[in-house]
Amino acid sequence: MKNLTRALAFSLVAATTVLATTACSVARDQQTVGSYVDDAGITTAVKAKMAEDKSVSATAISVETMNGTVQLSGFAKSEAEKARAGEIARTTKHVREVRNSIVVRP
């Protein structure tokens, strides 16, 4: 009886996890869990590259990724910094497209 209760509890937890994961893909604009994980990896890679590059202020630039498309926003001190941030994003593995919406502050 104890094993049956334990098996039922495990099944309930497993079913809830599957349903929650599926619901997340619908809530995130029909993005699958796998592509969401890939996008998170791309975002992390772009941010890490920016943090290593001294010519880009990684704290002033926001990076978001959706289906391989990287959206850059925030503020740059110069056109060169904006261009470098775009180049870093474009050369990151698995990036399909870059939308550079960084604003250059005068």
Image (cartoon, rainbow, N blue to C red):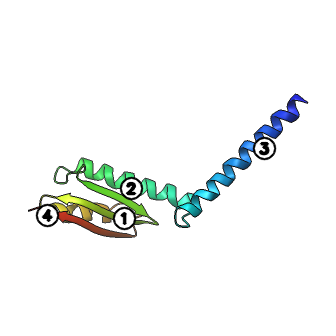
Dot 2: element: helix
Horizontal and vertical percent position of residue 67 = 46, 66
Density class for disc 4 (Cα within 10 Å; few <14, some 14-19, many ≥20) is: few
- Closer to the chain start, of discs 2 and 3, is 3
Task: Tell whether label 1 touches label 2 (CB within 8 Å).
Answer: yes
Density class for disc 1 (Cα within 10 Å; few <14, some 14-19, many ≥20) is: many
Residue type at mark 4 is: Ala
Density class for disc 2 (Cα within 10 Å; few <14, some 14-19, many ≥20) is: many
Residue most toward the top?
Answer: 2
Q: Residue, x 56% and y 67% (percent of image)?
A: 30
- Closer to the chain start, of discs 4 and 2, is 2
- Closer to the chain start, of discs 1 and 3, is 3
Instruction: Give the label, 3 or 4, closer to the camera.
Output: 3
Q: Which mark identifies residue 80?
A: 4
Let me know if residue 93 appears in the view.
Answer: no
Q: CA distance from mark 2 to mark 1?
A: 8 Å
Q: CA distance from mark 1 to mark 3?
A: 38 Å
Q: Residue, x 33% and y 57% (percent of image)?
A: 63
Q: CA distance from mark 1 to mark 4?
A: 19 Å
